[in-house]
Amino acid sequence: MRFLTVASAVLALVLAAPAAAQLTVVAEYRMGEDDVGAVIGGPGAAQTQPGAAGSPLQQFGAPVYGAGGTPRGRTSTLSMRFDGSSARYGGPALAMPTDNFGVEAWARSNSTTGNAMIVYNGNSATSGFGLFRSGANWAFLYGGIVIGGSTPVTPGWTHLAIVRDAGVNRFFVNGIQVSTSGEAPNPPAGALNIGGNNLLATEFFDGEIDEVRLFTFAPGAFSPSLLNTAERPAMPVPSLTLTGSALLALVLALLGVFALRSRS
């Protein structure tokens, strides 16, 4: 009887164990919430501070804080408003792999003329990856390789993400996969930019950007539900990890042995 009690307790712990984190955040910029003294309508900080990971990004031009309100796990109270001419935030490019990675952001555009950088890690002409507005369409770019996506820009906030998952590029708009392709990016080198291109004065974003995140993940670990597209439960949903599955199998086997011995 004591064995059965212990086995049942172990089984309960296994079933209650939350799943391990499936994304590794390389850099996150909430565009205001982590900046001291930020208020709607106020000037952007000289350096916008990272959230979960990353380094501060330097201000260029005159970005201004806008209202947030994008739906995600944490309520967004602020965003960053860019003027389409000189405002951006930038820093050194992030060292990231060229597979099993993702870039996501919320954007609200005031223009559909020309091209504009939302967030880009690398040199937009030769390396790296990021999110763009290409004329009247949302798109992703692999510098010197491909520009893809081509989903029409609509009024209001839009969540965008490019995820390269096991050699397949998956472009998401508001959490829905809208295109796939197989091109591979070159390793990022140069700069990380939000809101404008340090190489081209014609590729500055006119509008607001919020909740920027760059991440990696283990092969096979990505799910669209991990994107910052909607409110999530405060507590993780119980699920089995690989270790949990092994423990569960052991407990079930021991319970079977116990049942057979009880009959004899």
Image (tube, rainbow, N blue to C red):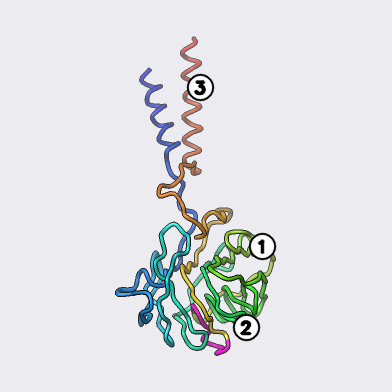
Vertical arrangement, residue 46 with respect to residue 72, above or below:
below
The residue that appears at 42% across and 41% down in the rendered structure is 17
Marks 2/1: CA–CA distance: 22 Å
* Badge nearest the viewer, 1 or 3: 1
Residue 198 in view here? yes
Residue type at mark 2 is Thr
Quick one: SS at disc 2? loop
Residue 180 in the image: state x and y as whole percent.
68, 63
The residue that appears at 39% across and 70% down in the rendered structure is 50
Q: Determine which residue is flagged by label 2.
A: 113
Quick one: SS at disc 3? helix
Q: Are marks 1 and 3 in contact (CB under 8 Å)?
A: no
* Pointer 1 local density, CA inside 10 Å: few below 14, some 14–19, many at least 20: few
- Looking at the image, is mark 2 or mark 1 earlier in the sequence? 2
Q: Determine which residue is flagged by label 3.
A: 256
Task: Give the quarter of the image for residue 62.
Answer: bottom left
Residue 129 in the image: state x and y as whole percent.
58, 74
- Looking at the image, is mark 3 or mark 2 earlier in the sequence? 2
Residue closer to the observer: 115 or 101: 115
Label for residue 178? 1
